[in-house]
Amino acid sequence: MAKKDIIQKISGYDEIIRENAILEKYGFDYQAKRGEVKSIIDALHPQGLDLTVSEVNQETATAKSIKLVSEDGFLPPFQAGQYINLFVEIGGVRTSRPYSIASAPTQTGHYEITVRKIEDGFVSNYLLDELKPGDKLSSSSPSGNFHYNPHFHGNKLAFIAGGSGITPFMSMVRELAHKNMGRRLHLFYGCRAEDDVIYRDELNRIAAAHRNFTWDLVISEPAPSFNGLQGFINAGLIKERLEGLDWTLYVCGPEAMYNFCLPELAKLSIPARKIRVEVMGAPKNITAYPGWPENLKSGDVFNVAIKGKKTISALASEPLMISLEREGVVIPALCRSGECSLCRTKLLSGKVYQPNGVKLRKSDRAFGYIHPCMAYPITDIEILL
Ligand SMILES: Cc1cc2nc3c(=O)[nH]c(=O)nc-3n(C[C@H](O)[C@H](O)[C@H](O)COP(=O)(O)OP(=O)(O)OC[C@H]3O[C@@H](n4cnc5c(N)ncnc54)[C@H](O)[C@@H]3O)c2cc1C
Ligand code: FES
C-alpha cells in the first residue's frame, strides 16, 4: 500500500485536512507560517539596540538633547512616556542609566533623549561632555509603564514636570501635535530658573497651534524681571487650571518635586488611582529616608560576598548595584528604580535597606529576593548571582 493511502486510514485524518483548508481560507493557518509570530515579536521587542548618535544639541546651559538612530535602520515602536536604558563604559566601569524618550512615537527615524547635568553625575557628565555625532551606544528596548492607557486614563491628562522630568511629557505633547489628537492636555512645568527651561519655544509653538494643549511655567527662583508664575506647583494652581479635577495626573521630576507636589494633590482629594508617578532613579540621600537605621552613617562600609565568586566592599549609602558595577560585576538592569524586577537577586544572608516604593513581590520578600538597584547593605551580606 502506498504511504499516502496508509496516512488516509489514520482516524481523524480527513477532519484535520478539512480544518486546515478552513484555516487557510480565513487566514489562520498558523502551521504554514511557523516562526512568523516569533520573528515579528523579536523585531518589535529586540533584546537590545545598537545605536549611533546622529545629533547633539545644547538645549539649555545644563541640558543637551541627543538623537539616536539605529545601526540597522529599524527602531522598535514605543509608547509616549517610555524610556530606554543606555549602556555605557566609563573609565573601565560598565554601567547603565535610563532616559525617557522625548521624541514622539510617530517619529520612527530616531529616538531623542535629553540629558541634564547633575553635580558629580557619573553618566550624565560623560554623556554631556564626551558624546558626539557618530559615537556608538547600546541600549535596552523601550520599556516602562508611564504611558497613556485609553481604558483607564480618560481624555483629560495633566502633567506635572520638574526639570528634566519634562522628557516623557514632551513625547506625549509631540504625539498630540503630530497626530492632531482630540485629547486634552495641560502641562505644569516647574523649573528653578528660566534658563533651565527645556523645550520652551517648541511648547509655545504647539500650544499656539493646538487649542487642546495648554501649559504653565512655574519658576521657583526667578530673576527680578520674570513676571510669570513663581514658587512651586501647588494645590491652588492645579485646582484653578483643572476645572472639575476629573483629570488623570502624571508626575515626573526630581525627588524634591514629589515631596512637595504629592501632598498638594492629596489636599485636592484626587484619588490615588488618578495619579501616576514616574520614579527617576535612586534617591539622592538614602540616609534621610524613613526607616533608615539611625546608627548607620552614609560612609559606613560593609562586605558583600558573591557566593562562589569574590567579596567586595560596598558603601551603605550607595545602591548595591553601583558597588557591584564599580568592581566589574554587572547584573541585568532596566529601570534602576526598583520597579521592573530585572535585577532581582537572592540575598543569602545579612540585611539590606529597601525604601518604600521598591516593587518587590510578597513572595520575593518572603524568600529573600532583593532589587540591588534600590537595595542598600546595612550589614555584611552574601548574595547569589
Ligand atoms: C525612567 C527614568 C527616566 C529618566 N529620564 C531622564 C531624562 O530624560 N533626562 C535625565 O537627565 N535623566 C533622566 N533620568 C535619570 C538618569 O537615569 C540618571 O539617573 C541621571 O542622568 C543621573 O545619572 P548620573 O550617573 O549622572 O548620576 P548618579 O548615578 O547619581 O551618580 C552620582 C554619583 O555616583 C557616582 N557613581 C555612580 N555610578 C558609579 C559607578 N558605576 N562607578 C563609579 N562611580 C559611580 C558618581 O561618581 C557620582 O558621585 C531618568 C531616570 C529614570 C529611572
Ligand atoms: S533594574 Fe529594575 S528593579 Fe532593578
Image (spheres, rainbow, N blue to C red):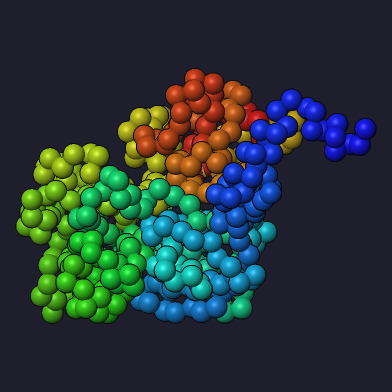
In this rendering, is residue 247 above or below 272? below
Q: Is residue 105 left or right of residue 242?
A: right
Residue in the picture at 58% in, 59% down: 139
User: Where residue 21 sits: x, y (%)?
Assistant: 64, 45
Q: Quadrant of residue 116?
A: bottom left
Residue in the picture at 65% in, 39% down: 18
In this rendering, is residue 22 above or below 47? above
User: Where residue 344 sits: x, y (%)?
Assistant: 55, 35
Front position in the image: 206 or 338: 206
User: Where residue 131 sits: x, y (%)?
Assistant: 56, 74
Which quadrant is home to the N terminus?
A: top right
Q: Hey, which residue is sitting farthest right in the picture? A: 1
Which quadrant is home to the C terminus?
A: top right
Q: Is residue 322 left or right of residue 278?
A: right
Specify whether residue 259 is in view: no
Residue in the picture at 32% in, 56% down: 253
Q: Tell how many labels.
A: 0
Specify whether residue 146 is in view: yes
In this rendering, is residue 42 above or below 73? above
Q: Hey, which residue is sitting farthest top in the picture? A: 366
Front position in the image: 234 or 102: 102
Residue in the picture at 37% in, 51% down: 146
